[in-house]
């Protein structure tokens, strides 16, 4: 009895030490998150950020002006916001969109949803937006723990929270104030509400996420439609359509000629503008994470690069769809299915580094499945490690500062593999998740066959 008691004490001591170590990791990750996220956001609050342009565009929308016009952007520029000397020059020369990426080409639905913020003075609106971001981030962490079925005292739960806190895309998203972060946070929270069968709340959250960032929210709506959650998916699409109708009606009532500028902004963004261009004319192209960035140095053709990237993304999507249709055991692998589509969605079209906040989902799956599928989860975790730092941007800065010898950086393999390492990590992660989906499907089929044989 004494020996058994001593063994129990020893096990408890080891467990306490492990928990204490995990808490230290959590504190370090939390400190990094605070310094690189909210603290930097507050320090740079008086500078330009990604929320300023849609804030002004939403103000233009409310006033019945063209929200995609550079001239209107300059006219409505807030007095309390920083005024750049290049603004009037580039508006006059017609190069503002190509050189700076704003006015942004957000859909009308995003401007309708952001419009309430434009009723506030700029500094207050940004403070409210930042606060909303941080609140939603905290709620999202709670949703991830609930989705994994962890207790907050579990080492796995503590380490998972620390890993999400350490993801650099979240830091970048908070500092820039980009709407992507809110779209991702709402989508993750929606997964939890969907599991609780709160269909109306889920539909509302997905509708807002889709309205803000269609390429983020739509992949989750697609998932639930494939799961035959018709009521939830239908309401979400109806709400998005309703928001779009409100926006289009407001522009129509004001006789606002917005469509040509909207199409022009999108074309410039994807073809000739610096912000989304993946060729050498964009000095910050390695801040992108779509597949074109890695493929272009190999193919040297924009048209061919886009075709190959879309083909790869389309192929992965078809494999995912086949896995979804064939699998009959979806409830116990929801996180895996959602992780796969989230990663795949980042590859074929324009996405910046902060869009990799979607990696919160595969991180949750990794910690949930570690004991059951250790080999796969370890590899998946290794593929996500590059996103603990903004690697592409850091290498770009080092290269422009001359800290990387031109003899090294001029090689094709440097551009393809080193500078684009995060893109390849996403591609391999997507393939790995699809493979795991296939293994889960075969395992489920074997279990079903075993149950049938037993019943017979």
Image (spheres, rainbow, N blue to C red):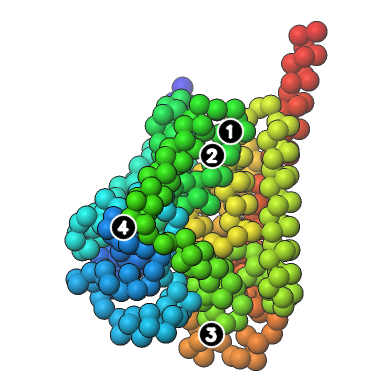
Q: Whole-Å distance between the Cαs marked 2 and 1?
A: 6 Å
Between discs 3 and 4, the one toward the N terminus? 4
| Residue occupied by mark 4 | 64
Residue contact at pointers 1 and 3, CB within 8 angstroms: no
Residue in the picture at 53% in, 45% down: 218
Regarding mark 2 in the picture, which secondary structure is present there? Answer: helix
x, y (%) of residue 8?
45, 30
Residue contact at pointers 4 and 1, CB within 8 angstroms: no
Left or right, 299 with respect to 341, comes to right
Residue contact at pointers 3 and 4, CB within 8 angstroms: no
| Residue occupied by mark 2 | 221
Regarding mark 4 in the picture, which secondary structure is present there? Answer: loop
Residue extending farthest to the top is: 456
Among the 4 quarters of the image, the one containing residue 446: top right
Q: Nearer the viewer, residue 84 or 337?
A: 84
Residue contact at pointers 2 and 1, CB within 8 angstroms: yes
Q: Nearer the viewer, residue 169 or 118?
A: 118
Regarding mark 1 in the picture, which secondary structure is present there? Answer: helix
Between discs 2 and 4, the one toward the N terminus? 4
- Within 10 Å of disc 2 (Cα), the crowding (few <14, some 14-19, many 20+) is many
| Residue occupied by mark 1 | 225
The numbered mark at residue 349 is none
x, y (%) of residue 213?
46, 52
Residue 146 visible within the image: no
């Amino acid at each position: 009895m004494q020996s058994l008691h001593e063994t129990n004490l020893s096990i408890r001591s080891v467990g306490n030490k492990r928990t204490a170590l995990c808490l230290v990791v959590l504190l370090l990750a939390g400190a990094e998150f605070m310094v690189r996220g909210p603290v930097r956001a507050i320090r740079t609050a008086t500078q330009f950020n990604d929320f300023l342009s849609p804030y002004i565009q939403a103000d233009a929308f409310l006033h019945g002006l063209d929200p995609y016009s550079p001239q209107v952007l300059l006219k409505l520029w807030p007095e309390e916001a920083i005024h750049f000397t290049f603004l009037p020059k580039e508006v006059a020369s017609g190069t503002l969109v190509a050189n700076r990426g704003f006015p942004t080409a957000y859909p009308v639905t995003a401007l309708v949803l952001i419009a309430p913020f434009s009723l506030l003075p700029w500094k207050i609106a940004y403070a409210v937006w930042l606060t909303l971001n941080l609140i939603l981030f905290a709620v999202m962490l709670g949703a991830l723990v609930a989705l994994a079925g962890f207790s907050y005292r579990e080492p796995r739960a503590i380490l998972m929270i620390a890993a999400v806190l350490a993801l650099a895309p979240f830091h970048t998203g908070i500092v820039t104030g980009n709407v992507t972060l809110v779209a991702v946070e709402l989508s993750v929270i929606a997964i939890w509400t969907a599991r609780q069968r709160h269909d109306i709340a889920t539909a509302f959250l997905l509708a807002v996420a889709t309205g803000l960032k269609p390429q983020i929210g739509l992949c989750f709506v697609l998932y639930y439609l494939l799961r035959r959650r018709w009521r939830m998916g239908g309401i979400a699409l109806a709400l998005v359509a309703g928001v779009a109708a409100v926006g289009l009606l407001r522009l129509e009532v004001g006789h606002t000629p917005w469509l040509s500028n909207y199409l022009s902004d999108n074309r410039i963004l994807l073809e000739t503008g610096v912000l989304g261009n993946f060729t050498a004319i964009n000095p910050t192209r390695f801040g992108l994470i779509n597949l074109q960035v890695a493929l272009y140095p190999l193919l040297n053709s924009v048209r061919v690069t886009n075709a190959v990237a879309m083909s790869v993304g389309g192929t992965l999507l078809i494999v995912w769809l086949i896995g979804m249709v064939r699998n009959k055991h979806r409830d116990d692998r929801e996180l895996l299915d959602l992780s796969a589509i989230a990663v795949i969605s980042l590859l074929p079209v324009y996405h910046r580094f902060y869009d990799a906040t979607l990696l919160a989902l595969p991180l949750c799956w990794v910690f949930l499945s570690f004991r059951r599928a250790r080999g796969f989860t370890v590899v998946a975790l290794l593929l996500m490690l590059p996103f603990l730092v903004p690697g592409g941007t850091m290498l770009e800065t080092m290269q422009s500062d001359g800290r990387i010898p031109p003899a090294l950086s001029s090689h094709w393999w440097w551009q393809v593999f080193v500078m684009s390492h995060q893109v390849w990590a996403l591609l391999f992660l997507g393939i790995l998740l699809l493979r795991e989906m296939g293994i889960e499907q075969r395992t489920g089929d074997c279990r079903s066959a075993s149950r049938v044989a037993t019943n017979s």
